[in-house]
Amino acid sequence: MRIDIVTIFPNFFDVLDLSLLGKAKDAGKITVNIHDLRDYATDSHKTVDDTPYGGGPGMVMKPDVWGLALDAIFAEVDLSKTVLVIPSPAGEVFKQSIAAELAEVENIIFACGRYEGIDQRVFDWAATKATTRALSLGDYVLNGGEVAVVAMVEAIARLRPGFMGNSESVAQDSHQDALLDYPAYTKPASWRGFDVPEVLLSGNHAAIDKWRREQQIELTQKIRPDLLADS
Ligand code: JCH
């Protein structure tokens, strides 16, 4: 899998060398290319934004600069195997099922906007060249696409075959089966007056499985009833 990220803050993605992704990168399973959008600016000030048509606050990212950046990356990939992801507060909400879809894609290009976002025509033009998705990380407002992209890349990368070294952990993940995880405990069995539930010390695996499933349903009912309504 090849991932390209276009941003005015290339250093932001240094964090991908840590976290889970370092392992996948080292194993040669994922290559990440970071591109500085300003390299595609055409004036001496390296301008990437301008005032919005129709008025209003803030600035909008210029389509011409984005066009040159995407031209350069599009020329290097097979567009029939490429998805362009544009993080946006107005996008479809990113969830585990979308991470799973994107984990099967050959090339993903992430376009990180700032200010009030990217000129709409960049999305409209790109959609004539490659599959293009506007994705929101959730119903809250960020200052730009970068934080959303770090989260999405981590969610996608850990689904790649062989990534975790233990394919069972992924299968058992919360959200893969639309229920929240059961609570986890480790030693000591008693800590500051709080004890590990006795069933977990019983060695009775059928009882443990039953208890964990009950915890999942109870927790989901209480914290995320919308997940139960979905299934
Ligand atoms: C972004 C912005 C429009 C703030 C600029 C690019 C994604 N889930 C999620 N929240 N926020 C984002 C996101 C993604 C890309 C950009 N901004 C700042 C843009 C706004 O309202 C019209 C507000 C925010």
Image: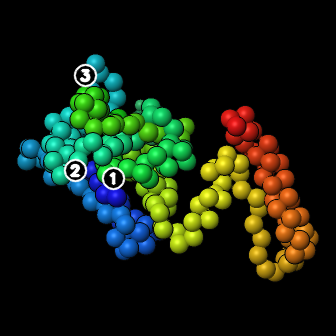
Q: Is residue 127 left or right of residue 89?
A: left
Residue type of the residue flagged with mark 1: Glu
Q: Nearer the viewer, residue 188 or 155?
A: 155
Nearer to the camera, 19 or 65: 19
Q: What amino acid type should be assigned to the residue bearing mark 2?
A: Val
Seen in the image, is 151 located left or right of residue 76? right
Above or below, 229 against 223 in this view is above
Q: Residues within 10 Å of mark 2 (few under 14, many from 20)?
A: some
Task: Using the rendered image of the protein, determine whether residue 69 is visible from the camera's viewpoint.
Answer: no
Q: CA distance from mark 1 to mark 3?
A: 36 Å
Q: Residue 224: x percent and y percent?
A: 72, 42
Residue 149 is situated, as x and y percent measured from the top left of the image, at: 41, 51
Indicate left or right for 32 with 163 as reference.
left
Q: Is residue 72 above or below residue 26?
A: above
- Residue to which mark 1 is pinned: 106
> Do labels 2 and 1 touch, CB within 8 Å?
yes
Q: In the image, is the residue at mark 2 within 8 Å of ligand 1 by its beta carbon?
A: no
Q: Which residue shows up at 15% across the image and 47% down it?
A: 75
Kind of residue sitting beneath label 3 = Tyr
Is residue 69 positioned above or below 10 on the image?
Answer: above
Q: Nearer the viewer, mark 1 or mark 3?
A: 1
Looking at the image, which residue is at 53% across and 41% down?
138
State the separation of the CA atoms marked 3 and 2: 33 Å
Residue identified by numbered label 2: 77
Quarter of the picture for ligand 1? top left
Q: Position of residue 97 (x, y in %)?
A: 54, 45
Say which element carries label 1.
loop
Position in image of residue 172 (x %, y %) = 66, 59
The answer to whether one can see residue 74 in this image is yes
- Answer with mark 2 or mark 1, whichever residue precedes in sequence: 2
Q: Residue at x 81, y 55 (%)?
A: 213
Residue with the mark numbered 3: 53
